[in-house]
């Protein structure tokens, strides 16, 4: 399978599939009035974005969500190490 455009910015992708799968995909492409290549490329791209989004989305359970919100709304007071680091940072910025 190849991208619809053959410009210098395109890349080729090939896959071996059964005749049954090809017939299924061709029928779906025909039903949408698109070429097989266009249908495959857009379907694969859509699936790829969905997988990436699913893996990059942080999902928390109820307990974790409540702990996160509580930490944001009621942050702990900075300890001595954090206050020291903040002071060094401010001194570095003003130097």
Image (cartoon, helix red, strand yellow):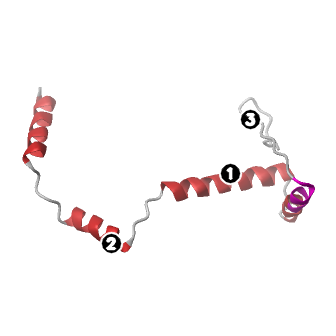
The majority secondary structure of the magenta stretch comes to helix
Q: Residues within 10 Å of mark 2 (few under 14, many from 20)?
A: few
Q: Which mark is residue 23?
A: none
- Distance, label 1 to label 3, CA atoms, is 14 Å
Disc 3 crowd, CA 10 A, few/some/many (<14, 14-19, 20+): few
Q: Is residue 57 left or right of residue 90?
A: right
Q: Which residues are magenta?
A: 18-24
Mark 3 — residue? 11
In this rendering, the label closer to the viewer, 3 or 2: 2
Name the residue tied to disc 1: 45
Q: Position of residue 93 (x, y in %)?
A: 15, 31
Q: Is residue 71 magenta?
A: no
Residue 3 drawn above or below residue 76: above
Query: Where is residue 75 shown, x and y percent of the image?
Result: 17, 60
Q: Earlier in the sequence, mark 1 or mark 2?
A: 1
Q: Secondary structure at mark 1?
A: helix
Q: Residue at x 17, y 65 (%)?
A: 74
| Contact flag, marks 1 and 2 (Cβ < 8 Å) | no
Magenta run includes residue 19: yes
Label whose residue precedes the other's in the sequence (1 or 3): 3
Q: Quarter-wise, where is residue 88 in the image? A: top left
Q: Is residue 55 above or below residue 83?
A: below
* Res 63 → quadrant: bottom left
Give SS at disc 2.
helix
| Residue 29: % across, % down | 85, 59
Q: 74 or 91, which lies in front?
A: 74
Which residue was labeled with disc 2?
A: 63
User: Of the residues under marks 3 and 2, which one precedes in the sequence?
Assistant: 3
Label 1 Cα neighbours within 10 Å, binned few <14 / some 14-19 / many ≥20: few
Q: Residue 32: image x %, image y %?
A: 83, 63
Q: Name the residue rendered at 47%, 58% in the picture.
A: 57
């Amino acid at each position: 399978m190849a991208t619809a455009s053959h410009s210098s910015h395109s890349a080729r992708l090939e896959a071996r599939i059964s005749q049954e799968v090809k017939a299924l995909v061709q029928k779906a492409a025909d039903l949408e009035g698109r070429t097989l290549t266009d249908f495959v490329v857009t379907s694969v791209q859509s699936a790829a974005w969905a997988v990436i989004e699913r893996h990059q989305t942080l999902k928390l359970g109820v307990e974790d969500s409540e702990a996160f919100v509580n930490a944001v709304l009621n942050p702990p007071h900075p300890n001595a190490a954090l206050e020291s680091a903040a002071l060094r940072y401010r001194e570095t910025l003003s130097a």
